[in-house]
Image (cartoon, grey):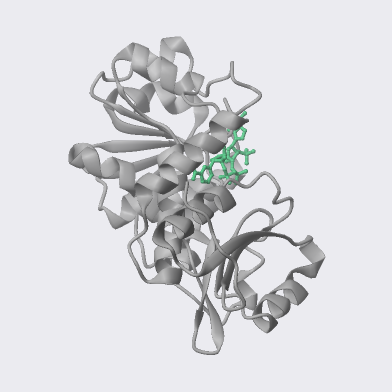
Amino acid sequence: MAEITVMGTTGLLGIIGYPVEHSLSPAMQNAAIAHLKANYIYLPFPVVPDQLTQALQGLDAIGVRGFNVTIPHKQAVIPLLTSVSDVARTIGAVNTVYREGAGWYGTNTDIVGFLAPLEAYPGWTEGATVVLGHGGAARAVVAGCAQKSCQQVQVVGRNAEKLQQFFASWENSPLQPNLTVHSWDQLPHLLPSARLIVNTTPVGMHPHVQASPLTDEQWLQVSTQCIAYDLIYIPSPTLFLQQAQKRGAIAIDGREMLVQQGAAALERWLQTEAPVTVMRMALNQKLSDR
Ligand code: NAP
């Protein structure tokens, strides 16, 4: 594997989060940087929540060229940036920051990441997309669906008040999904006509690998032509995707979204095409080492 040589001129990139030590981004990004022989290094920066303002000033002071943002700073960073892209504002979260002139510009590459694996199945926009959950990742999914003019987006959640807030939050958005919101008990009416089902809940994530947001019986209502997309990347496949495969449906896991959001961020910083295959291999290696 190619290595990075750090010199006095090496440009700094990184990720801010708390905690950040489990992030898979440094392995993926540094593999790409080494492959490109770019004079950069990508570092993890643990930033406690009440130090975010000082941390951004520090990153600015030491000339960091760009950085990713992860939990818990994705929303809190927005007012600290000079400007924010329309997609990031719509989602309400920034995951990628880069320099523009004298300031910091924030955007969100989760939409690009989410959409990338769906490119192989262009017909998905012609049917209904059922989105399980209405948290941060669901916002990127719904925004991606809107960008692709998906026929219908049906968001399913367990909390009526949060569902209504989620629905209302798109009212003045530049992206206008054809959106309806539903309680979990309405699933029997939604599943038979779903073209795409996206799990954006953490149900089934390591270590709760025996859990799935859908029961075996519910899967019997799903079309065998359906695409099941789980944003979870550990384990792979999740029980949700195993059920989908058993049903004969197409299964997409969360790894490719993770790789593609990282690739899109690297392209912003380096202004060159990201080596996606190298990043995918680095991620898979890191996950198999766990
Ligand atoms: P989040 O903001 O906390 O949202 C989680 C959503 O799931 C909420 O709507 C929550 O509902 C719902 N939920 C949680 N437990 C549930 C349960 N037992 N039954 C039904 N609904 C439940 O989290 P997030 O940031 O959106 O992340 C969600 C998942 O996506 C995580 O697994 C994360 O790893 C994954 N993700 C993957 C990528 C990628 O690149 N592959 C990117 C982002 C996120 P309540 O509000 O009612 O609790």
Q: Position of residue 116 (x, y in %)?
A: 32, 47
Q: Position of residue 143 (x, y in %)?
A: 39, 55
Does 85 sit above or below residue 251?
Answer: below
Marker count (numbered): 0
Does 244 sit above or below residue 110?
Answer: above
Choose between 213 and 39: the one closer to the eye: 39
106 left or right of 275? Answer: right
Outermost residue, bottom side? 102
Q: Position of residue 160 (x, y in %)?
A: 58, 40
Choose between 97 and 170: the one closer to the eye: 97
At a point 80% along the width and 69% down the height, the residue shown is: 51
At a point 35% along the width and 24% down the height, the residue shown is: 191
Residue 272 in view here? yes
Residue 155 in view here? no
14 left or right of 241? Answer: right
Image quadrant of ligand 1 equals top right
Choose between 241 and 129: the one closer to the eye: 241
Does 6 sit above or below residue 2?
Answer: below
At a point 59% along the width and 20% down the height, the residue shown is: 209
Q: Position of residue 87 (x, y in %)?
A: 42, 65
Q: Quadrant of the C terminus?
A: top right
At a point 51% along the width and 49% down the height, the residue shown is: 28
Does 17 sit above or below residue 27?
Answer: below
